Image: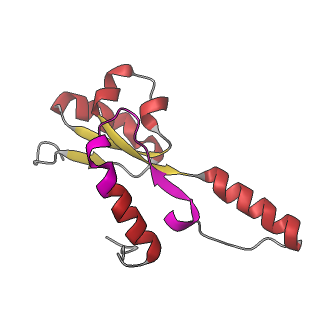
Amino acid sequence: MYQNGADVVYTAAGGSFNGSFPAAVDAKKWAIGVDSDQYNTVGNPAFKPHILTSMVKQVDAAVYGSIKEFKDTGKASKKSFALKDGGVGYSTSGGFVNDIKPKLEEFKKKIEDGSLKVSPTP
């Protein structure tokens, strides 16, 4: 992807960073992590300067919500936790997106209130 002109690669499968992070280092480009704040959890410190951000799954919100629902109702339902539910987010570790954070928060608010629609498919 970098050889074809990409400046940033987002690999949306948990273990795929094993290939994308070294490739970002080699290409002197950016990668985006997935599932957790990979800037803080990546084993190789050489990768950190190339991790722009990470899409973070807030599993704690889903677990808490499910347990609370069961405690309150005695039932558990199937539910997706979206941005507005605190189910996903992005990391700012490394400070690489600090300059655009106000714009990111503006987009986040618009997605949450429905004024900006995000397609569930590419």
**Residue 36 horizontal/vertical position (percent):** 50, 43
Asked if the magenta segment contains residue 84, the reply would be yes
Q: Quadrant of residue 43?
A: top left
For the point 36% across and 77% down, the residue is 117
**Residue 34 horizontal/vertical position (percent):** 44, 47
Residues drawn in magenta: 83-103
Q: In which quarter of the image is residue 87?
A: bottom right
Q: In this view, does 83 lie to the left or right of 3?
A: right
Quadrant position of the C terminus in the picture: bottom left
**Residue 85 horizontal/vertical position (percent):** 58, 65
Q: Is residue 76 above or below residue 14?
A: below
Q: Which residue lies furthest to the front in this view?
A: 102
For the point 40% across and 41% down, the residue is 92
Residue in front for this viewpoint, 11 or 60 = 60
**Residue 111 horizontal/vertical position (percent):** 41, 70
Asked if the magenta segment contains residue 100, the reply would be yes
Q: Which residue lies furthest to the top in this view?
A: 45
Residue in front for this viewpoint, 29 or 115 = 115
Q: Can residue 79 be seen in this view?
A: yes
Q: In this view, does 103 lie to the left or right of 74?
A: left
For the point 49% across and 30% down, the residue is 41
Q: Quadrant of residue 105?
A: bottom left
Q: Is residue 90 above or below residue 112?
A: above
For the point 50% across and 64% down, the residue is 83
Q: Is residue 82 visible?
A: no
Q: In this view, does 30 lie to the left or right of 77?
A: left
Q: In this view, does 5 lie above or below 47?
A: below
